[in-house]
Amino acid sequence: MWGSSGSDVFAVGFSGIFHYDGNNWTTMSGTLSQYNGVWGSSGSDVFAVCDYDTISHYDGNNWTTMNTGTSKDLNEVWGSNSSDVYAVGDSGTILKYDVTVFGDQTIDENSSLTINFSVSDADSSNFTVTAISSDVNILPNENISITNTNKSYTITVFPTTEQAGSLTVTVQVADPEGLTAVESFILTVRYVNDIPVIGNISDQITNEDTAINSISFTATDVESSACQLTVTFDTSNQSLIPNDNITYACNSDSYALSITPASNESGYASITVAAYDGNLTATTSFGLTVNGTPAISNISSYTTNEDTAINSISFTATDVESSACGLTVTFDSSNEH
């Protein structure tokens, strides 16, 4: 029997739990049978223990069954407050576990979490500590590690890459007698949008008035379906390579560019490729050189006498991409006799 006052008394027995309000005794609903002990910190925080390894808790309105983690009958209960409660089991020993309350946790996708916690027992320091996940797709059990250094415990969780959502991690502590304590916390793995990834594109070269086709690269995004990224292009020299002169095709995130230089134009342009997933943008750049045709000035016809050399026939040969005198100049005669 236990009471918070003369008008708030709880009694337990084989038939259940009874309450006295100062005038009458009534049988409380929502309880079990074969209760052996009762204690509370207040009229809205009452614990009752019974056979079949059960502890019932009263919050002032309803009785609920608590998870004890033991298979032993419980005979008596006492505590100093609602989080410091002792129970007597069939082993004849008063056991009290003090497992740090973890609190709910939130981390970003593709990251890990480490929590330090302590475990104590009045009768033992030899514990078996295990943890299980309620959603092994987000957090496989093998991705939970527990270490113990000088009785200080650490639990580290490594959620699966690119997985998000909420789950419950349940930590159980067992002593050599088989009695256990259980604590749980909710782990929320927040979705994080990953930036797209664009593969390297080598610098390119083509001749004036000549299109260049099938410049290949990849653009991927873990949250997007194949070829669903928005891909755009911007050139540093619109006179040479207008943006509209760049087209592409995509197959399974493999892209092929086609670029047509402006007519009769030559020079260099830096081309920036952007891939947008609806939130984030990735960019890369490559250079394109359009090689213009060298220009040779007109050479007049000349006449000379037999066995007489002719010197200083002058002309110019220029090229916008070549340094002075950097062209390779060759000659071919129609009559080598």
Image: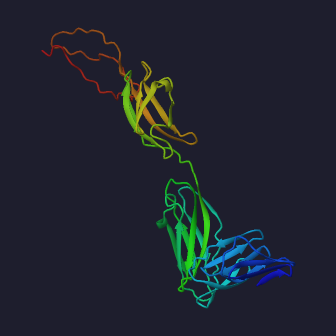
Color scheme of the displayed model: rainbow
State the quadrant of the N terminus: bottom right
Residue farthest to the left? 337
Q: Write the residue at 75% across / 71% down.
A: 59
Residue 324, position as x, y percentages in the image: 38, 28
Residue placed most toward the observer, 231 or 307:
231
Residue 308, position as x, y percentages in the image: 18, 14
Label tally:
0
Q: Is residue 198 above or below residue 92?
A: above
Q: Write the residue at 60% across / 89% down.
A: 123
Q: Is residue 163 above or below residue 29?
A: above
- Indicate left or right for 140 with 309 as reference: right
Is residue 201 among the parts visible in the rendering?
no
Residue placed most toward the observer, 73 or 117:
73
Q: Quadrant of residue 251?
A: top left
Q: Write the residue at 25% across / 9% down.
A: 302
Residue placed most toward the observer, 286 or 168:
168
Q: Is residue 298 above or below residue 188?
A: above
State the quadrant of the C terminus: top left
- Indicate left or right for 171 with 271 as reference: right
- Indicate left or right for 293 with 152 as reference: left
Q: Is residue 59 above or below residue 127?
A: above
Q: Quadrant of residue 33?
A: bottom right
Q: Quadrant of residue 63?
A: bottom right
Is residue 241 among the parts visible in the rendering?
yes
Residue farthest to the bottom? 92
Q: Write the residue at 38% across / 21% down.
A: 209
Residue 244, position as x, y percentages in the image: 49, 24
